[in-house]
Image (cartoon, rainbow, N blue to C red):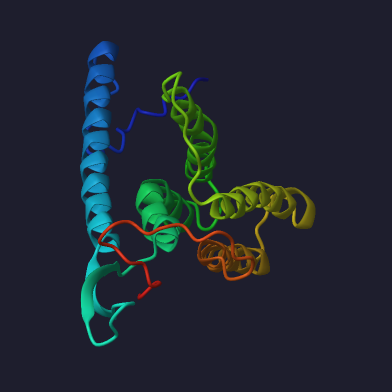
């Protein structure tokens, strides 16, 4: 015998049995509710990203002695946050916050630390979307007679390598080491890979290991490091 999973109401109308309503009307109501939720999430994410951008773009004034006359100083502005660190921490967190929170709610509150059908798939799908779709759009949007170059090729190489490593480690953790289960040490190691990525990317950005050609700084802005 077939069972109507919506016979006792849904999350939208938990105290009202709408199973006898017209199917088209129910579809329209749930579509409007879904779009309303998407709009709310978009507004919250936009405010969150604007606040993060405000934090990461903060500058401070410092006094720097002139090269020709050490007795004279110039007041210049420096960024409080390093661009690479800001993009890998706050910017990444802000753009991925909705799916991360969704996965946490589903695993911790609903499924008692068992992965559901929505949370992990949403995170992996978002990562795959960023890797393929957004990269493809960025490449295709460049005009035919123009060229673009990656400014920090070393940082790009570090982040690209860690992206591939993340998928390999995910396969090992879920299929080889402990099939269909994440053990505590695997979770801790996965979490520790993030600060390792940030540190290595920062070292590559500052060229501490293999210094290359020094590029001129932007006018009016002198980058002296990360102060956070």
Residue 191 in the image, given as x and y percentages of width and height: 56, 65
Judge by depth and name the residue closer to the eye, 28 or 102. 102
Question: Could you tell me which residue is drawn at 45 percent across and 20 percent down?
Answer: 145
Which quadrant of the rendered structure holds the C terminus? bottom left
Of all residues shown, which one is farthest toward the right?
Answer: 176
Left or right of 87? Residue 64 is left
Judge by depth and name the residue closer to the eye, 109 or 151. 151
Residue 49 in the image, given as x and y percentages of width and height: 27, 51
Residue 186 in the image, given as x and y percentages of width and height: 66, 64
Could one spot residue 101 in this view of the protein?
Answer: no
Rendered position, 164 above or below 77: above
Could one spot residue 10 in this view of the protein?
Answer: yes
Question: Could you tell me which residue is drawn at 67 percent across and 52 percent down?
Answer: 165
Left or right of 29? Residue 173 is right
Of all residues shown, which one is farthest toward the front?
Answer: 68
Of all residues shown, which one is farthest toward the bottom?
Answer: 71
Question: Could you tell me which residue is drawn at 38 percent across and 72 percent down?
Answer: 224
Q: How many marks?
A: 0
Residue 146 in the image, given as x and y percentages of width and height: 44, 25
């Amino acid at each position: 015998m077939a069972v109507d999973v919506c016979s006792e109401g849904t999350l939208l109308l938990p105290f009202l049995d709408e199973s006898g309503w017209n199917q088209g009307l129910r579809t329209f109501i749930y579509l409007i509710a879904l779009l309303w939720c998407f709009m709310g999430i978009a507004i919250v994410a936009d405010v969150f990203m604007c606040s993060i951008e405000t934090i990461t773009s903060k500058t401070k004034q410092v006094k720097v002695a002139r090269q020709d006359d050490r007795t004279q100083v110039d007041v210049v502005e420096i960024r409080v946050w390093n661009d690479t660190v800001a993009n890998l921490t706050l910017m990444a967190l802000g753009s991925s916050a909705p799916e991360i929170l969704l996965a946490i709610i589903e695993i911790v509150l609903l499924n008692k630390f068992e992965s559901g059908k929505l949370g992990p798939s949403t995170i992996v799908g978002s990562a795959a979307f960023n890797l393929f779709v957004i990269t493809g759009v960025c490449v295709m949007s460049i005009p035919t007679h123009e060229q673009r170059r990656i400014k920090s090729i070393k940082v790009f190489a570090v982040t690209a390598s860690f992206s591939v490593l993340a998928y390999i480690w995910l396969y090992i953790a879920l299929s080889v080491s402990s099939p269909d289960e994440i053990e505590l040490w695997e979770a801790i190691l996965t979490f520790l890979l993030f600060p390792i990525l940030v540190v290595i990317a920062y070292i590559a950005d500052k060229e501490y290991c293999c210094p290359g050609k020094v590029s001129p700084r932007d006018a009016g802005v002198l980058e002296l490091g990360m102060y956070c």
